Amino acid sequence: MIVCDAWTQQDVSTITISLLISLDGMTDSKHSFATIPLLAGLGEAERKRIASVSHWSNVSKRQLVMEKGGESQGLWIVTQGRLQGLDYTIDGREVGLYFITPGQFFGELALIDGQSHPEHVIATAASEVCLIPLPICRDLMRHHPGIANQISNALATRVRNLIRQRTLLTLATPLQRLAAQLIDLANETTQIEFIPTHQELAMMINASRETVTRAFRTLQVQGIVKRDGNRLILQHRTSLENMAQGIQGADD
Protein backbone atom coordinates (compact mmCIF):
# COMPACT_ATOMS: atom_id res chain seq x y z
CA MET A 1 0.00 0.00 0.00
CA ILE A 2 1.34 3.41 -0.97
CA VAL A 3 0.76 5.98 1.75
CA CYS A 4 2.77 9.04 0.72
CA ASP A 5 6.23 9.97 -0.44
CA ALA A 6 7.57 10.36 3.11
CA TRP A 7 5.86 7.33 4.74
CA THR A 8 6.63 3.66 4.33
CA GLN A 9 4.18 0.91 5.33
CA GLN A 10 6.13 0.47 8.57
CA ASP A 11 5.95 4.22 9.23
CA VAL A 12 2.17 4.18 8.89
CA SER A 13 1.77 1.26 11.29
CA THR A 14 4.14 2.86 13.80
CA ILE A 15 2.36 6.22 13.63
CA THR A 16 -1.04 4.60 14.05
CA ILE A 17 0.05 2.49 17.02
CA SER A 18 1.74 5.50 18.64
CA LEU A 19 -1.39 7.59 18.23
CA LEU A 20 -3.60 4.93 19.78
CA ILE A 21 -1.22 4.53 22.72
CA SER A 22 -1.16 8.30 23.23
CA LEU A 23 -4.95 8.35 23.37
CA ASP A 24 -5.12 6.28 26.56
CA GLY A 25 -5.37 8.14 29.83
CA MET A 26 -5.78 11.60 28.34
CA THR A 27 -9.38 12.23 29.45
CA ASP A 28 -9.92 14.92 32.09
CA SER A 29 -12.70 17.22 33.23
CA LYS A 30 -12.06 19.81 30.51
CA HIS A 31 -13.26 17.45 27.77
CA SER A 32 -16.92 17.79 26.94
CA PHE A 33 -19.44 16.76 24.30
CA ALA A 34 -21.71 19.71 25.08
CA THR A 35 -21.23 21.24 21.62
CA ILE A 36 -21.25 18.01 19.57
CA PRO A 37 -24.47 17.82 17.50
CA LEU A 38 -24.42 14.00 17.37
CA LEU A 39 -24.83 13.78 21.15
CA ALA A 40 -26.98 16.86 21.68
CA GLY A 41 -30.04 14.75 22.46
CA LEU A 42 -28.40 13.05 25.44
CA GLY A 43 -28.58 14.29 29.00
CA GLU A 44 -25.59 16.04 30.51
CA ALA A 45 -24.83 13.12 32.83
CA GLU A 46 -24.74 10.64 29.95
CA ARG A 47 -22.55 12.92 27.82
CA LYS A 48 -20.09 13.21 30.70
CA ARG A 49 -20.07 9.44 31.14
CA ILE A 50 -19.27 8.91 27.46
CA ALA A 51 -16.58 11.62 27.56
CA SER A 52 -14.96 9.91 30.55
CA VAL A 53 -14.56 6.57 28.72
CA SER A 54 -13.59 8.07 25.36
CA HIS A 55 -10.03 8.68 24.19
CA TRP A 56 -8.88 12.22 23.43
CA SER A 57 -5.76 13.35 21.62
CA ASN A 58 -4.12 16.42 20.14
CA VAL A 59 -2.71 15.72 16.69
CA SER A 60 -0.30 17.78 14.63
CA LYS A 61 -0.62 18.86 11.02
CA ARG A 62 -0.17 15.97 8.55
CA GLN A 63 -0.45 13.39 11.33
CA LEU A 64 -2.22 10.20 10.34
CA VAL A 65 -5.33 9.67 12.48
CA MET A 66 -7.15 6.81 10.74
CA GLU A 67 -5.47 4.28 8.47
CA LYS A 68 -6.98 2.72 5.38
CA GLY A 69 -7.43 -1.00 5.91
CA GLY A 70 -7.60 -0.69 9.68
CA GLU A 71 -10.43 -2.21 11.70
CA SER A 72 -13.04 0.00 13.33
CA GLN A 73 -12.28 0.94 16.92
CA GLY A 74 -15.28 3.22 17.24
CA LEU A 75 -16.35 6.61 15.98
CA TRP A 76 -13.96 9.56 15.70
CA ILE A 77 -15.19 13.09 16.45
CA VAL A 78 -13.32 16.31 15.63
CA THR A 79 -13.53 18.89 18.42
CA GLN A 80 -10.91 21.34 17.13
CA GLY A 81 -9.01 21.88 13.88
CA ARG A 82 -9.64 20.22 10.54
CA LEU A 83 -8.97 16.80 9.03
CA GLN A 84 -9.16 15.39 5.51
CA GLY A 85 -10.13 12.01 4.15
CA LEU A 86 -7.88 10.90 1.33
CA ASP A 87 -6.73 7.95 -0.72
CA TYR A 88 -3.88 7.22 -3.14
CA THR A 89 -3.86 6.25 -6.79
CA ILE A 90 -1.92 3.24 -8.03
CA ASP A 91 0.98 5.51 -8.98
CA GLY A 92 1.05 7.10 -5.52
CA ARG A 93 -0.76 10.42 -6.10
CA GLU A 94 -2.91 11.75 -3.24
CA VAL A 95 -6.62 12.10 -3.89
CA GLY A 96 -8.54 14.40 -1.52
CA LEU A 97 -12.00 13.05 -0.69
CA TYR A 98 -13.59 15.31 1.94
CA PHE A 99 -12.88 17.57 4.90
CA ILE A 100 -13.97 17.07 8.52
CA THR A 101 -14.49 20.12 10.72
CA PRO A 102 -15.29 20.56 14.44
CA GLY A 103 -18.48 18.82 15.49
CA GLN A 104 -18.31 16.34 12.61
CA PHE A 105 -17.32 12.68 12.83
CA PHE A 106 -15.71 10.01 10.67
CA GLY A 107 -15.16 6.27 10.60
CA GLU A 108 -18.90 5.61 10.35
CA LEU A 109 -18.71 3.26 7.35
CA ALA A 110 -16.53 0.68 9.11
CA LEU A 111 -18.63 1.16 12.24
CA ILE A 112 -21.78 0.21 10.35
CA ASP A 113 -20.63 -2.63 8.10
CA GLY A 114 -17.84 -4.06 10.27
CA GLN A 115 -15.31 -4.00 7.43
CA SER A 116 -12.02 -2.10 7.25
CA HIS A 117 -11.70 1.63 6.68
CA PRO A 118 -11.67 2.46 2.93
CA GLU A 119 -9.65 5.67 3.29
CA HIS A 120 -6.97 7.43 5.31
CA VAL A 121 -7.76 10.47 7.46
CA ILE A 122 -5.02 12.98 8.26
CA ALA A 123 -4.94 16.30 10.11
CA THR A 124 -4.62 19.33 7.82
CA ALA A 125 -4.07 21.56 10.87
CA ALA A 126 -3.31 21.07 14.54
CA SER A 127 -6.45 19.39 15.84
CA GLU A 128 -8.13 17.69 18.76
CA VAL A 129 -9.93 14.41 18.10
CA CYS A 130 -11.88 12.02 20.25
CA LEU A 131 -12.49 8.31 19.74
CA ILE A 132 -15.71 6.92 21.21
CA PRO A 133 -14.97 3.19 21.71
CA LEU A 134 -16.76 0.68 19.51
CA PRO A 135 -18.88 -0.96 22.28
CA ILE A 136 -20.11 2.47 23.41
CA CYS A 137 -21.00 3.42 19.82
CA ARG A 138 -22.99 0.26 19.28
CA ASP A 139 -24.77 0.74 22.59
CA LEU A 140 -25.67 4.32 21.63
CA MET A 141 -26.99 3.26 18.24
CA ARG A 142 -29.03 0.47 19.81
CA HIS A 143 -30.67 2.57 22.51
CA HIS A 144 -30.84 5.97 20.80
CA PRO A 145 -32.45 5.78 17.33
CA GLY A 146 -31.80 9.50 16.81
CA ILE A 147 -28.06 8.93 17.00
CA ALA A 148 -28.28 5.93 14.67
CA ASN A 149 -30.21 8.08 12.19
CA GLN A 150 -27.63 10.86 12.34
CA ILE A 151 -24.80 8.43 11.65
CA SER A 152 -26.71 6.81 8.78
CA ASN A 153 -27.62 10.19 7.30
CA ALA A 154 -24.00 11.35 7.54
CA LEU A 155 -22.88 8.26 5.66
CA ALA A 156 -25.53 8.84 2.98
CA THR A 157 -24.39 12.45 2.64
CA ARG A 158 -20.78 11.30 2.31
CA VAL A 159 -21.74 8.91 -0.50
CA ARG A 160 -23.72 11.61 -2.32
CA ASN A 161 -20.80 14.03 -2.03
CA LEU A 162 -18.37 11.45 -3.40
CA ILE A 163 -20.68 10.80 -6.36
CA ARG A 164 -20.82 14.54 -7.02
CA GLN A 165 -17.03 14.70 -6.69
CA ARG A 166 -16.63 11.94 -9.25
CA THR A 167 -18.86 13.85 -11.66
CA LEU A 168 -16.81 17.01 -11.04
CA LEU A 169 -13.67 15.18 -12.13
CA THR A 170 -15.17 14.61 -15.60
CA LEU A 171 -15.16 18.35 -16.34
CA ALA A 172 -12.81 19.19 -19.17
CA THR A 173 -10.45 21.78 -17.72
CA PRO A 174 -8.81 22.46 -14.34
CA LEU A 175 -10.47 25.90 -14.21
CA GLN A 176 -13.90 24.33 -14.62
CA ARG A 177 -13.14 21.76 -11.93
CA LEU A 178 -11.81 24.41 -9.54
CA ALA A 179 -14.89 26.59 -10.08
CA ALA A 180 -17.19 23.63 -9.43
CA GLN A 181 -15.19 22.62 -6.33
CA LEU A 182 -15.40 26.12 -4.85
CA ILE A 183 -19.16 26.21 -5.42
CA ASP A 184 -19.45 22.85 -3.70
CA LEU A 185 -17.35 23.97 -0.73
CA ALA A 186 -19.41 27.14 -0.35
CA ASN A 187 -22.59 25.05 -0.36
CA GLU A 188 -25.50 27.50 -0.71
CA THR A 189 -23.53 30.50 0.57
CA THR A 190 -21.16 32.99 -1.04
CA GLN A 191 -18.14 32.28 1.12
CA ILE A 192 -15.89 29.46 2.27
CA GLU A 193 -14.90 29.94 5.89
CA PHE A 194 -11.67 27.93 5.81
CA ILE A 195 -10.40 27.79 2.27
CA PRO A 196 -8.21 24.72 1.60
CA THR A 197 -4.65 25.25 0.45
CA HIS A 198 -3.82 25.15 -3.24
CA GLN A 199 -2.24 21.73 -2.70
CA GLU A 200 -5.38 20.39 -0.97
CA LEU A 201 -7.57 21.71 -3.79
CA ALA A 202 -5.21 20.21 -6.37
CA MET A 203 -5.62 16.81 -4.71
CA MET A 204 -9.40 17.14 -4.99
CA ILE A 205 -9.65 18.23 -8.64
CA ASN A 206 -6.85 16.09 -10.11
CA ALA A 207 -4.53 18.97 -10.98
CA SER A 208 -1.11 20.23 -9.97
CA ARG A 209 -0.66 22.88 -7.29
CA GLU A 210 0.82 25.22 -9.90
CA THR A 211 -2.28 24.80 -12.09
CA VAL A 212 -4.55 25.63 -9.17
CA THR A 213 -2.46 28.71 -8.37
CA ARG A 214 -2.80 29.95 -11.97
CA ALA A 215 -6.53 29.28 -11.96
CA PHE A 216 -6.94 31.17 -8.68
CA ARG A 217 -5.04 34.09 -10.15
CA THR A 218 -7.49 34.14 -13.06
CA LEU A 219 -10.49 34.15 -10.72
CA GLN A 220 -9.02 36.93 -8.58
CA VAL A 221 -8.00 39.12 -11.51
CA GLN A 222 -11.54 38.87 -12.89
CA GLY A 223 -12.94 39.80 -9.47
CA ILE A 224 -14.90 36.57 -9.17
CA VAL A 225 -13.35 35.57 -5.84
CA LYS A 226 -11.55 37.46 -3.08
CA ARG A 227 -9.37 36.26 -0.20
CA ASP A 228 -10.15 37.59 3.26
CA GLY A 229 -7.72 35.94 5.66
CA ASN A 230 -8.67 32.25 5.78
CA ARG A 231 -11.98 32.98 4.08
CA LEU A 232 -12.71 33.00 0.37
CA ILE A 233 -15.55 35.26 -0.74
CA LEU A 234 -17.40 34.37 -3.94
CA GLN A 235 -18.08 37.90 -5.19
CA HIS A 236 -19.78 36.70 -8.36
CA ARG A 237 -21.21 33.25 -7.74
CA THR A 238 -23.17 33.26 -11.01
CA SER A 239 -19.98 33.89 -12.99
CA LEU A 240 -18.32 31.03 -11.13
CA GLU A 241 -21.25 28.74 -11.94
CA ASN A 242 -21.04 29.73 -15.61
CA MET A 243 -17.32 29.01 -15.56
CA ALA A 244 -17.93 25.55 -14.07
CA GLN A 245 -20.41 24.84 -16.87
CA GLY A 246 -17.89 25.92 -19.48
CA ILE A 247 -19.97 28.93 -20.55
CA GLN A 248 -16.99 31.23 -20.03
CA GLY A 249 -13.41 31.01 -18.84
CA ALA A 250 -13.15 27.30 -19.62
CA ASP A 251 -10.19 27.76 -21.93
CA ASP A 252 -7.71 28.41 -19.08
Image (cartoon, rainbow, N blue to C red):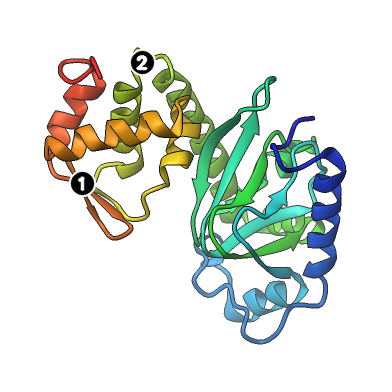
Figure quadrant of residue 70? top right
Figure quadrant of residue 152? top right
* For residue 226, above or below residue 53: above
Residue depicted at x 79% and y 30%: 1
Residue depicted at x 74% and y 69%: 54
Q: Which residue is mark 1?
A: 190
Residue depicted at x 66% and y 56%: 76
Residue 171, label in figure: 2
Q: Position of residue 133 (x, y in %)?
A: 78, 60
Q: Residues within 10 Å of mark 1 (few under 14, many from 20)?
A: some
Residue 185 horizontal side relative to residue 115, left or right? left
Q: Position of residue 72 (x, y in %)?
A: 79, 46
Q: Residues within 10 Å of mark 2 (few under 14, many from 20)?
A: some
On the question of residue 100 being in view, the answer is: yes
* For residue 131, above or below residue 9: below
Residue 42 horizontal side relative to residue 71, left or right? left
* Foreground: disc 2 or disc 1: 2
Query: Tag 1 or tag 2, which sits nearer the N-term?
Result: 2
* For residue 230, above or below residue 191: below
Q: Quadrant of the C terminus?
A: top left
